[in-house]
Amino acid sequence: MLIPAPLPGRPRPRPAPLPALPAPDSTADVSPDSVLIGMARADRSGRVSERGLLGALGWPAGHRIDVHPHGGMLVITSVRAGQQVVGSRGELPLPASVRQMCAIVPAQPLLLAAIVSHDLLVIHPASSVAWLLADLHAQVIGGRRVG
């Protein structure tokens, strides 16, 4: 099989813009006060560590989890027969396929949101957070008072 060589100096394609997230479901019992927030960066192997949030969730080393992309973010759930495991140093493995789907690259800031009452962790790439806040930032730049 013949595979052509990549073109030199060709920039990497930019990820497609993410759609706006749907409005929160009013039946869900998630209030802003019940969400714990942290920041982390994926290492070159795609692992993320935020021990404070893992402690709040009660996810020790060896705890089984599943990682699924959802609307440009990653949703990590606690599952008895999960395909991934919390590492010995409290790191979460993010498979390459889901990192690519969400445009997560090494050293990029990530916003982590632990929803303890639902036993899950949501990881938002910085690019999606900036996208979601774009209208608010436009109001600030325009000199309009926010809120």
Image: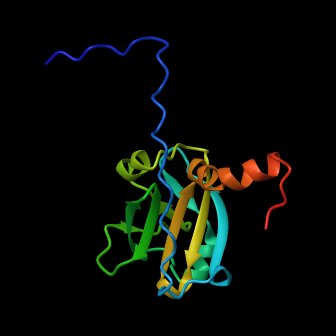
Q: Residue at x 61, y 74 (%)?
A: 53
Residue at far top of view = 8
| Residue 39 seen | yes
Q: Residue at x 66, y 61 (%)?
A: 39
Locate the C terminus by quadrant.
bottom right
Q: Quadrant of residue 115?
A: bottom right
Q: Position of residue 51 (x, y in %)?
A: 62, 71
Q: Nearer the viewer, residue 59 or 136?
A: 136
Q: Position of residue 71 (x, y in %)?
A: 43, 58
Q: Is residue 145 above or below residue 77?
A: above
Locate the N terminus by quadrant.
top left
Q: Is residue 72 above or below residue 24?
A: above
Residue 137 in the figure: left or right of residue 83: right
Q: Is residue 80 above or below residue 134?
A: below
Q: Residue at x 61, y 44 (%)?
A: 107
Q: Is residue 118 above or below residue 42?
A: below
| Residue 52 seen | no
